[in-house]
Image (tube, helix red, strand yellow):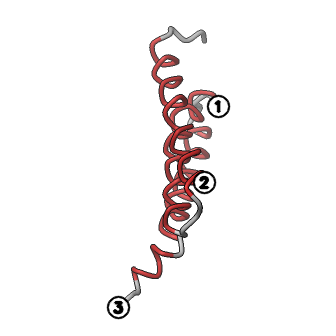
Amino acid sequence: MPDFATFFASGHAADVVLIVLAVEVLLLLRAGRRLDDVLLLLLPAALMMLGLRAALVGAAWPWIALPLAASFPVHLADLLHRRTPQKK
């Protein structure tokens, strides 16, 4: 049976999610999505995963708080970006 405690404690669980997000970026770009749309869509999740990784490996609290705090304004920017009509 795999040792999930070690897998999570090492931060590798968050690394897997970050890799999946990177693949998703590539797939969305290949599908014709605009770079700014893709980054605003997935950057908040990537920032939260960085905060999670920092917490899992026992980093100091600023390394946990900074990416988590940064994810919120990026998320708001994404929402604002979606509300504004896009030029083609």
Judging depth in this view, the residue of 69 and 42 nearest the camera is 69
Q: Determine which of the numbered discs, if any, sits on residue 1 in the image.
A: 3
Residue 15 x, y percent position in the rendering: 55, 64
Residue position for label 2: 63
The reply to whether discs 1 and 3 touch (Cβ–Cβ < 8 Å) is no
Residue position for label 1: 35
The mark that comes first in sequence, 1 or 3, is 3
Q: Residue furthest left?
A: 1
- Residue 38 falls in image quadrant: top right
The reply to whether discs 3 and 2 touch (Cβ–Cβ < 8 Å) is no
Q: What residue type is labelled 2?
A: Trp
Circle 1 SS class? helix
Q: Residue furthest bottom?
A: 1
**Crowd around label 3: few <14 · some 14–19 · many ≥20 (10 Å):** few
Judging depth in this view, the residue of 60 and 77 nearest the camera is 60
Q: Residue furthest front?
A: 61
Residue 19 x, y percent position in the rendering: 57, 59
